[in-house]
Image (spheres, rainbow, N blue to C red):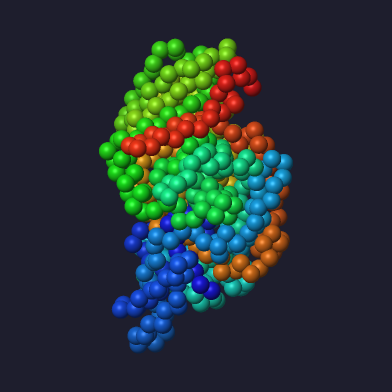
Amino acid sequence: MRRAGAVWAARCGAGSPFPPLGPGMAEPGPGPGQEQQSGPAGKEEAAPAPKKRRLAGGERYVPPPRKLNTGVSFGAAHFAETSYYFEGGLRKVRPYYFDFRTYCKGRWVGRSLLHVFSTEFRAQPLAYYRAAARAGRLRLNEQPVRDLDVVLKNNDFLRNTVHRHEPPVTAQPIQILAEDQEVVVVDKPSSLPVHPCGRFRHNTVIFILGKEHGLQELHTIHRLDRMTSGVLMFAKTVEVSKRIDEQVRERQLEKEYVCRVVGEFPEHEVVCEEPILVVSYKVGVCRVDPKGKFCKTIFQRLSYNGKSSVVKCLPHTGRTHQIRVHLQFLGHPIVNDPIYNMEAWGPDRGKGGKIDKTDEELLKALVEEHRSKQSLDILGIMEEDLNSSAESKDSGDTSDCTKPVQADPSSENSCPAEDAQDPGRNDTAGRASGEKDPLCVECKMIRRDPSPKELVMYLHALRYKGVGFEYCSRMPEWAAEEWEE
């Protein structure tokens, strides 16, 4: 089956059986001196098999890595993996078969595949991986894995076929605000990730624009948190992307947000310059800390209805969750923020940086609070993710999947942007999507769907301005002066 490359890679979640390909990692393919050809849709021609060197008795052959064909968007083959359906105000994805793929990490070399699964991918029991091997779903260098005791070597290429379930998102459509030969600007609904990451692939802005609007080969210019709505801009060409990236580096871009916060926000302008530190990449939690990175946000109250205030936010830097963390520090968290307005932070909800918990205790309390409400999906994680030890090894380093663009100050880097790596094709797309799978744990579980209301956070990117352009969206309903919950 021919394969399309991608501008973005499908990053595995912390509990996924394999991590993503990192920068400099290559897909198996042509050997030295062999060219990899690509057609108009990014299709590759199969390369002649490289000559095998002579092996010592019993030595296992590892093919050389293949160069990755970068710069091509997700295509029709990826979009055809599954389909959407709508139910109860939610957009849902029919379960589908999907291949997670990775090269052997350096720390895995010399370890058995069984040991790697048992120590780093504990989201599934070993019995699952044994059953997956028997079913032919585990492949090493494109050969079925017969023995999980096989010892891994450098450049080993692993493929794991899973039955994939995605969380639902709001059924609210993506509105296209502007489109020309250079850019596409949309009004992103809350709950939608910008690009494939974690448990999300088809329920993302990139896939919906490709599947429903025929917009492909888009380049992210900036990002919004999954729960943040508002103006989101894409470049149609690499040249335009680079030009706007230069404006980002020169701090020539202006971004304006509106939010609804708890209580009566001060009438005068408020400037917050508290440094912010990432507590957890997996859960996506930050806090004010002297050891954190410098950041600055200017706030101005727009209205107050006796219970909550609408506030304009002007971030001058782009740290993870900057607006949300600064508002929490000021004692006015966003009304329905699923992270920074929770009881887990203590009676003052983190005001003034007062938490009285270690980072580990805070994370545990946040997870337990959402678990009790059956709302882990709101955090973008699932129960199985919490059993994985992958975060301690991988999640703190986003260098292998972060595109060099200005981070959105409300965004979650637990779902970071992805470089021009392989999006992971579904080689098993011929199987019927949506059918019950005998090995799939998710197929045996019943999860509570979130309500459309739970998938909205009162933080909206209202305006995005640069040299030669300015795009705005309408004020959301919850930002009206007379609005009441």
Give the image location of residue 288, x and y in percent. Answer: 39, 29
Q: Is residue 117 above or below residue 268?
A: below
**Residue 256 in picture, x, y percent from top left:** 42, 29
Q: Residue at x 64, y 42 (%)?
A: 171
State which quarter of the image contains the C terminus: top right
**211 left or right of 394?**
right
Q: Nearer the viewer, residue 236 or 394?
A: 236
- When the figure is inspected, residue 444 is found, relative to residue 280, above or below; the finding is below
Residue extending furthest left? 250
Q: Quadrant of residue 164?
A: bottom right
- The structure residue drawn at horizontal position 49% and vertical position 75%, both measured from the top left corner, is 142
Q: Residue at x 46, y 29 (%)?
A: 257
Observer able to see residue 58: yes
Residue pushed farthest front?
180
Residue 353 as seen in the image, left or right of residue 388: left
Q: Position of residue 181 (x, y in %)?
A: 43, 50
Q: Residue at x 65, y 53 (%)?
A: 84
Residue 13 in view (yes/no): no
Query: Depth check: 349 or 167 in front?
Result: 167
Would you place residue 133 above or below residue 7 in this image? below
Residue 290 in percent (x, y) is at: 32, 29
Q: For this rendering, which residue is in front, 376 or 186? A: 186
Residue 389 relative to residue 88: left or right: left
